[in-house]
Image (cartoon, rainbow, N blue to C red):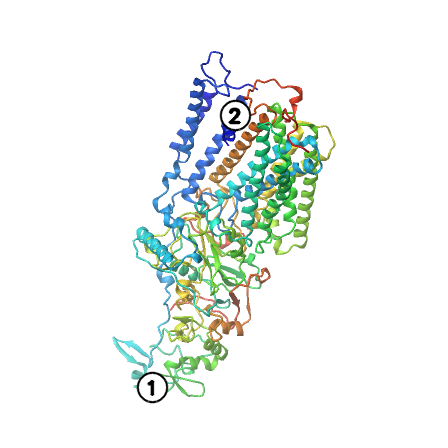
Amino acid sequence: MKEYGRFLWRCFRLSFVGDWRYHIWMTLLTVVALFGLNAYAKQLVEGLATTGMTDQVSWGLYIANFTFLVGMAAAAVMLVIPVYVFRNRELHDLVIFGELLAVAAVIMALLFVVVDMGRPDRFLHLFRRFNFPISMLTWDVIVLNGYLLLNLHICGYLVYCAYRKRPPAKSFYIPFVFIAILWAISIHTVTAFLYVGLGGRPFWNSAIIVPRFLASAFAAGPAFLILVLLVIERFTRYQVPDKAIATLRSIVTVSLLINLFMLGSEVFTELYAGSAHAVSWKYLLFGVHGHSALVPWIWTAIALECLAAVWLLIPQRRSDVAMSVACAFIVIGIWIEKGMGLIVPAFVPSPLGEIVEYVPTWNEILICFGIWAFGLLLFTIFVRISIPVLSGRMTFDREYDPNLPDSPQRASLEPDSGSMAQG
Amino acid sequence: MRLLITAAFLALFAWFSVGSSRALDPSNARRVIDPVDIDRDAARQVMGDPPRIEVANFEMSCQECHGLFDSKERRPGDVKQHAHIRLEHGLNDRCHNCHHVEDRNLLALPGGESLPYGEVERLCASCHGPTYRDWQKGIHGKSRGTWETSSPEHHRMVCTECHDPHHPAFRPIAPLPPPFKPHAGEAQHSASHPSKEKRNPLRIHRGDDAAPSPAEKPH
Amino acid sequence: MQDIEQPRADAPHQGGLGMSRRSFLRHSGTALGGMAAAAAALKPLMELQDEDIPSVDAFIQKHYKEMDEAEMAQALARISAKVEERFGIEPNLRDIKPKEGVEFVYALNLSRCIGCRKCVYACVDENNQSRSPELQYIRVLEMPKGTLDLEAGNHDYDRPTVPSDDHFYMPVQCHQCADPPCTKVCPVEATWQEPDGITVVDYDWCIGCRYCEAACPYWARRFNFTKPGLEPEDVNPDMSYLSNRPREAGVMEKCHFCLHRTREGKLPACLEVCPVGARKFGNVLDPESEVSQILKNKRIFVLKEDVGTLPRFFYYFDERYPRSGAVEEG
């Protein structure tokens, strides 16, 4: 126990160690996070009237970000499938990054839910009277927190084992890994069910939204992870195997194509029949009655995704810059499509046919940036800690020394005593 | 580097300390409705039984005067004394369609049978049968007191408590104001909202802003 | 990749990460700066007023269904004290239980409604709603004749007089559905349906997630996006726990059929003010009630029947006589 405490303290100290670029990045994130905190303090005092939400559009940017981040969290565990199911040893190291990203994403998602609540001081009511299993929100609370604990356990255990230079016991993490694979699918399915189960919102009441969620998550999540890996490769000693990027790229390509296909099917289904249920789609794509605030957004998203799909389909050698651009396109496009393109149109028009558009306020946007900054801060710290520990440069019997020269065998995260993950 | 970061934090500290603690405009825009417009006890003044009016500070029943002179066969419009009454009641064109020829304290059913003012609904029923049936069941008209129909406090409002017998169709009235409409997007309202940062989407229409006329609405 | 601090050969004592005492001081200076900035970021919290911070009693208060009489009495006392403190008015606040053998149903005659909106404002007057920002439970739609498509409805009509000849008027409020989608989705059961059919909200339990507002097909629910603006002259002291006691920021509310009146036999405010008798209310379990007669004899319909919510709010047409078009004096 005391050893674990010392481990945590050393991790804490390690998170402040880095070169000037690291410090600038962390300071920037801290500043943005503090702006978000300040904005949230204002929201706590004055209520959600500081946002752009109204009775007509009662969910906005917060829930949009929540939806996107749940998808990211689910997809981050996608890497686990090729590694553990298909026994692809080269990608073992990436499991950790994927799961750490999942942890950061889930924390961000939970924070977005908290800032969206009108009475966060009453969150204990969830424990005192829980409307399970009828309310899908209760399912979501369970699966998200369970997922967080699952991933914290897996990462924490593997990292701590590397720190203690002990081979991790399979029974302590392999079953959890397989549970995490299934659980990842469930968190995003449950989140989709939140929306899909509402008969009063025909824009959401469509079965294809559930697989669309998964497809877009599995496009955006690995794309984000590719970006993260490219950054890690650039700024740390860790070498990302080509195979990893290639695998992720395949996942992204297939998922993106499926996502675009499903989007096309939805659009056709709604617009061909032209029933009254299609109003929200018309509002999103073309505008309705002179209201068209979301139209430029959705077309930008579709364009970005299509461009990225085309680029990814062209077989070519790995080119970092172009790859980054494509991945960024995908992340941004799917963020728009899932966020503003899924949450807001369901509220326009209102169930009584009233059109009130939604524009987030600056306070709301600041809070969103603040949570993203905080999440990236957390993730950076996670990576900052896990690379040295997993590559054996900081263990219980060795002080961390950044100046230690890198030996060729240390290119991967495999610690000194054997591989960290036993098949 | 360390200095830069510390300076950044101190600048942030200063910014937050000095900055506003509020994101919303403190607005007291509130609509005040005249209580007269939502008076729940509003009802027509009905004639008593026997019907009484006030003439030159004296309260007398109708027959007290009408018994003194002949006022048969008058048409509405001929009569100077009841000039404020303009009869607009379907096919009715004479006073005596409803009022008893001999005794003005009574009403007259078709066929000549007299009827006290207290049973005016029977007179209405003599032409408006289906409406009367509905009224008896509580479908037409209004109830007061309680929803419990078996309770003695349940009071069905009588026809004349809502309808003016000489002009039974309700006259159009001015509606109360439409709801404050939240608007998004600055461009539409920049003129009336100089403070962009503190825009509160819930209360765009202040008391001094006129609601847009129906002609401007996209519908 | 360079660390910031180069370990100095002559430094007296160095910690695990190569830090000297001087650098430690410098580090803590930055850390202090960061903490100061974080503290200043929280400065807006100083604007919180005492009455907005929940008391311990309120914090540990149980769910409505779990409170026994003593606990309810305590809660009522706490709320009454708060009302007195805030408005200077002593309320008649009680918890009224539903009557046995009663299921409330509302019927609305669309041939009669003239769209005057008196019901909207009578409701606001009765139920201590926020005036600033404005919160109204009832929304009247001006519909063109010939369609029931709600999208064609105009919510913002503002004519010199109503009714307009080419339109009919449809007020919408909570339908107290028999299969409510809103109560299904609440994660903490802050809203549920009572035995007499009224869907109620426990304002002290709601966490403000607004899932019920997303779920309602009739846009019947309202959220307090900020602290309700209520002046003492607006307050109706006749209150009950589940209906019209003053609410706080961050909780949902909606039409509750004026249960503080109707559970004591009286009529809801919207019905009482209606000048044309378009509204009907009563106990559908009583075959002699007005609403039972309407359901038996009139061609009633409900909104969005295909969604399957089984509303207890029935509309019907009853067109008989032409309206008088002109406004006349006298």
Q: Identify the mark at residue B70; answer none if there is no mark.
A: 1
Marks 2 and 1 close (CB-CB < 8 Å): no
Q: Is residue B33 something that shows in the picture?
A: no
What type is the residue that disc 2 sits on? Answer: Leu
Report the chain holding disc 1. Answer: B
Considering only vertical position in the picture, is B41 above or below B214?
Answer: below
Please tell me which residue lies in front, A71 or B138. A71
Tell me where residue C1 appears, x and y as whole percent. Answer: 57, 20
Circle 2 residue:
A14
Q: Residue furthest left?
A: B57
**Among the 4 quarters of the image, the one containing residue B6:** top left
Tell me where residue C295 appears, x and y as whole percent. Answer: 52, 71
> How far apart are labels 2 and 1 at the CA level?
113 Å
- Mark closer to the observer (2, 1): 2
Asked whether, in this view, residue C155 is left or right of residue A244, the answer is left
Tell me where residue A300 appears, x and y as whole percent. Answer: 62, 39
Please tell me which residue lies in front, A370 or A286. A370
Alpha-carbon neighbours of circle 1 within 10 Å: few (<14), some, or many (≥20)?
few
What type is the residue that disc 1 sits on? Answer: Asp
Asked whether, in this view, residue A239 is left or right of residue B9, the answer is right
Task: Say if labels 2 and 1 share a chain.
Answer: no
Alpha-carbon neighbours of circle 2 within 10 Å: few (<14), some, or many (≥20)?
some
